[in-house]
């Protein structure tokens, strides 16, 4: 639905079922950007008693990365009671880092996901890169 609506940035990878390959190919071919919010996805899976569902989020992120789709940092850390998962921002950033590594990003790619890539894709000034 998001792809059909023409969004540039896709946030929140699905839990439970990996994104189909044809959708991953479309995200890549249409030069879309992803912000998987893996910390939030893992927290929701655990909070709803379905921790194994997080494996699908990792698999989707791994497949998006393999297809060359930019993976950007995003925690979706929220105030208490705003969602089933409310990790503090610092914890969310650390968890995201570990999840990116599990999804196949190298340490350098994980750092770029939180620094150079957002600067590039959000058209931030050169000084921020």
Image (cartoon, grey):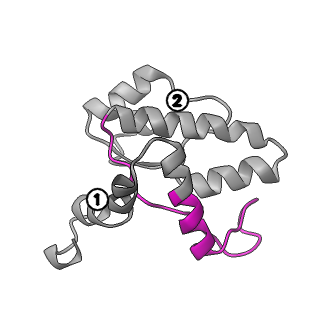
Can residue 1 be seen by looking at this rendering? no
Mark 1 residue crowding within 10 angstroms, few (<14) / some (14–19) / many (20+): many
What's the magenta bit mostly, secondary-structure-wise? loop
Quadrant of the rendered image containing residue 125: bottom left
Which residue lies most toward the bottom here?
127
Mark 2 residue crowding within 10 angstroms, few (<14) / some (14–19) / many (20+): some
Of the numbered discs 1 and 2, the one sitting upstream in the chain is: 2
Mark 1 vs 2: CB contact within 8 A: no
Q: Vertically, is 79 above or below 95?
A: below
- Counting from the top left corner in percent of width and height, residue 101 is at 49, 49
Q: Is residue 120 left or right of residue 55?
A: left
Which residue lies most toward the top here?
22
Which quarter of the image is occupied by the C terminus?
A: bottom left
Q: Is residue 35 magenta?
A: no
- Counting from the top left corner in percent of width and height, residue 93 is at 54, 67
Q: Is residue 8 left or right of residue 81?
A: left
Residue ID at (48%, 40%): 61
Q: Which residue is mark 2?
A: 19
Q: Vertically, is 25 above or below 48?
A: above
Q: Is residue 70 magenta?
A: yes
Over which residues does the magenta segment extend?
A: 68-97
Count the marks: how many?
Answer: 2
Residue ID at (42%, 26%): 23
**Which of labels 1 and 2 is toward the front?**
1
Q: Vertically, is 36 above or below 31?
A: below
Residue ID at (72%, 52%): 44
Disc assigned to residue 84: none
- Counting from the top left corner in percent of width and height, residue 21 is at 44, 22
Which residue lies most toward the left here?
126
For mark 2, give the secondary structure: loop
Quadrant of the rendered image containing residue 13: top right
Disc assigned to residue 117: 1
């Amino acid at each position: 639905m998001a792809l059909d609506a023409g969004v540039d940035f896709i946030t929140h990878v699905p839990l439970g079922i990996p994104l189909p390959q044809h959708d991953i190919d479309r995200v890549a071919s249409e030069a879309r950007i992803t912000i998987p919010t893996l910390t939030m996805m893992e927290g929701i899976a655990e909070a709803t008693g379905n921790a194994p569902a997080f494996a699908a989020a990792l698999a989707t992120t791994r497949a998006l990365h393999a297809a060359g789709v930019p993976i950007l940092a995003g925690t979706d850390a929220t105030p208490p009671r705003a969602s089933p998962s409310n990790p503090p921002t610092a914890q969310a950033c650390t968890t995201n880092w570990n999840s990116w590594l599990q999804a196949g990003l190298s340490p350098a790619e994980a750092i770029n996901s939180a620094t150079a890539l957002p600067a590039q894709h959000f058209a931030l000034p050169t000084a921020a890169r």
